[in-house]
């Protein structure tokens, strides 16, 4: 059996994601699609809108056959580490291909970009270092250095536009896949409809970004516009989550507890939190004392040196008690944590699990890996924040459908 | 002017406390009564029922002229340290006497006990060490060693009954006063009516313990029985607090946040918390994962080696992020933090403040003492737990009456 991989968050799953899964299967000719999915905290440094089991069910009902959890260590990390973790898991699960969403849907520009930046590695990296010193954020520096290298080269072949978040991730998937030496083939599917960052959406297209869907649902519930943009099972799962926990996940909900932890720990202890950069802990404590809302807090903390998402990732580490030691302990995935599976996925596992590059963890209780302990702790903290009891990782077997 | 000191918590203030203040003035002949009072967390390791400013107002309206805050370092500590901190503050404020509540109201037995334990120090301490090794709690060991020393001596003079919490504190006040070498005279007032630990109360006596009052108010509001047991201003302040914050302080209210912090920190970090004893951090984490209520949690954590109050003090340190380093940094009071004052109290301060043994802190912003920073942090965490905004220490001038 042939497997293709996708890297997803599904916060929540919408029609664009269904299209991506369908196209992945068609383009790669795979028998099964393996999704590696962030847990309860996401790459942009946010608590997920609905929990990982809810999102696993959506994945399985939309075309994925196997869902593995991307460990917290990679899920709540900058694009390059996020990609390395995700690709490492897909490679260990013997995917021969992977497929990501990009702006225009052609793989060629990504390959050109990859080649250009490999050829010009020294020049590019020197330019990044120079730009970072001017006080701009690291992602801005990467993006500007890239433009300047592309410009200087007068590159003829089309290049990927690395100002778009999806393209940045795609580029890092390809880079990680090449470094892994597993020979996985890269595919990409063009995004249809709204861009990642656009809060608005075209009400008639049946396409809304996950951000727009969350905004609409928080504001007005499941509107007609949302109904058109997501499959029926997303509607059902969203309603079920809200009925059970009263409210969706997000920083507003977690702000009282995050604020308490910041004030409790103080700048001294916060200095040990993963990715905390010098001086930021003082801004964070001052802002937490003053700001009654998460948005007000973020407005007080942000600076042009750090992106909003970077600060949010640091805050996720604060909430989850992820300190530098724990964060730097492991750089590579250590297991394949199974969150859910279809009938076809089960056949695939039965055939190949003994040949996987990492141990398969179907029950949380069967492993005492310290990286898994981190994932479970993050999961428990999410549960406490949404009003659920902790320990769901131990109580919940992989979700099975089909 | 002559000042007498009292050490109080007023959680909340009731008729017995009014009696104690009145008798203190009468017995000592003092012009002003100085109360040193725990802040928002108490000696038994509990968040206060109402905050320190509410309790300061009650103190001033009931006969105290000056209220100083007992710093967290001493307030949330075992009896001997609690007493040393409190007596240190009273001595620095030039009290020539102090007066505490005891079971039978005679000072003689306390002096006899003090003399006996000084004479038999070596024997007594050896016996305490021996008993602690048998696995009983430290307070039990103290109490049994004391009985065995008293017994062996066939002591003729009446001794204080050190199985009663008020007597234990009284004994430690006297011991601390003697060690301080300030020559403060000790007085005691007999408690009338209900014992400290009795949850029930005699409905006709007009006397209920603070514990019984809290229980009744939580259960049924301000009942007729409570009305008879507290002065009018306590009723007004209780109603005001409940109107403003919806709920009274107590572990039930703080349990969700404490539970989150325990699970976030894990056993490794909890091992650094002040007073945490080996192995207890693991019990605490396991119980927090399993127990949905504070009471269920405590039932799971308690062992015969540790008293309930000791565990609660450790949990207060967990909530407030008080680690061993911070807790062991200072052993003595460093300032006189003024919470409230009457007209007479103001005259006293104007006359003597330059001769005080410690700096007077009337505005939190005027001091950057690290011990005060701890008090303010604890105060902020209490505020967050009761739904108030932090920073009240900076917004609130000393309460003035009269």
Image: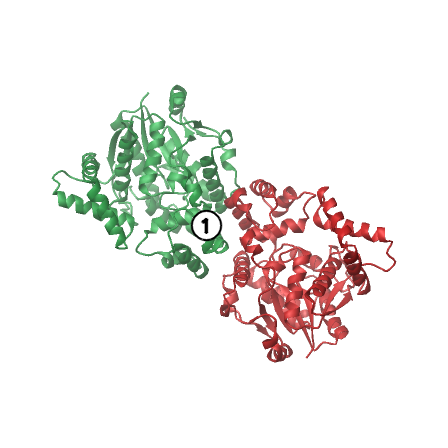
Chain colours: A green, B red
Please state if A256 lies on the left or on the right of A139 as rendered.
right
With respect to residue B102, does A133 lie above or below? above
Q: Residue B379 falls in which quadrant of the image?
A: bottom right
With respect to residue A282, does B133 lie above or below? above
Instruction: Tell me if I can see residue A145 in this picture.
Output: yes
Please state if B151 lies on the left or on the right of A367 as rendered.
right
The image position of residue A76, as x and y in percent, is 38, 42
Residue bearing mark 1: A254
The image position of residue B60, as x and y in percent, is 64, 72
The image position of residue A86, as x and y in percent, is 34, 34
Front-most of B388 and B399? Answer: B399
Residue at the spot 58% in from the left edge and 58% down from the top edge: B247
Q: Residues within 10 Å of mark 1 (few under 14, many from 20)?
A: many
Chain at numbered mark 1: A
Please state if A52 lies on the left or on the right of B251 as rendered.
left
Front-most of A247 and B129? Answer: B129
Instruction: Tell me if I can see residue A63 in this picture.
Output: no
Question: Mark 1: which secondary structure?
Answer: helix
Residue at the spot 77% in from the left edge and 62% down from the top edge: B102
With respect to residue A70, does B358 lie above or below? below
Quadrant location of the C terminus of chain A in the rendered image: top left
The image position of residue A9, as x and y in percent, is 36, 39
Front-most of A89 and A224? Answer: A89
With respect to residue A251, does B232 lie above or below? below
Q: Residue furthest top?
A: A351
Q: Residue A18 falls in which quadrant of the image?
A: top left
Quadrant location of the N terminus of chain A in the rendered image: top left
């Amino acid at each position: 059996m042939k497997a293709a991989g996708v890297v997803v968050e599904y916060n929540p799953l919408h029609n664009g994601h269904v299209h991506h899964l369908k196209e992945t299967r068609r383009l790669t000719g795979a028998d099964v699609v393996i999704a590696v999915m962030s847990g309860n905290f996401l790459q942009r440094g946010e608590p997920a809108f609905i929990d990982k089991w809810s999102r696993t069910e959506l994945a399985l009902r939309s075309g994925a056959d196997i869902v593995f959890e991307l460990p917290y260590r990679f899920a709540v990390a900058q694009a390059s580490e996020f990609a390395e973790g995700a690709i490492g898991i897909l490679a260990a699960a013997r995917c021969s291909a992977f497929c990501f969403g990009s702006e225009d849907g052609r793989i060629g520009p990504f390959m050109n970009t990859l080649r250009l930046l490999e050829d010009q590695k020294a020049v590019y990296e020197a330019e990044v270092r120079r730009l970072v010193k001017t006080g701009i954020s690291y992602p801005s520096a990467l993006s500007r250095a890239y433009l300047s290298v592309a410009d200087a080269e007068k590159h003829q072949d089309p290049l990927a536009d690395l100002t778009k978040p999806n393209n940045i991730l795609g580029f890092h998937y390809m880079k990680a896949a090449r470094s892994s030496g597993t020979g996985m083939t890269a595919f990409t599917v063009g995004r249809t409809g709204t861009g990642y960052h656009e809060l608005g959406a075209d009400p008639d297209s049946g396409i809304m970004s996950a951000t727009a869907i969350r905004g609409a649902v928080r504001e007005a519930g499941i509107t007609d516009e949302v109904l058109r943009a997501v499959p029926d099972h997303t509607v059902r799962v969203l309603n079920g989550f809200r009925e059970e926990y009263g409210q969706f996940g997000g920083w507003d909900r977690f702000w009282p507890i995050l604020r308490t932890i910041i004030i409790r720990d103080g700048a001294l202890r916060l200095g040990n939190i993963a990715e905390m950069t010098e001086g930021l802990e003082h801004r964070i404590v001052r802002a937490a004392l003053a700001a009654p809302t998460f948005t007000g807090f973020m407005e007080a903390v942000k600076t042009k040196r750090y992106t909003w998402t970077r600060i949010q990732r640091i805050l996720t580490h604060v909430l989850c008690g992820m300190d530098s030691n724990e964060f730097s302990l492991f750089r590579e995935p250590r297991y394949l944590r199974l969150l859910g599976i279809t009938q076809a996925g089960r056949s695939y596992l039965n055939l190949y699990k003994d040949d996987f590059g990492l141990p398969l963890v179907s029950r949380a209780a069967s492993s005492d890996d310290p990286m898994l302990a981190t994932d479970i702790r993050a999961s428990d903290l999410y549960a406490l924040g949404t009003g659920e009891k902790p320990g769901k990782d131990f109580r919940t077997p992989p979700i099975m459908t089909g």
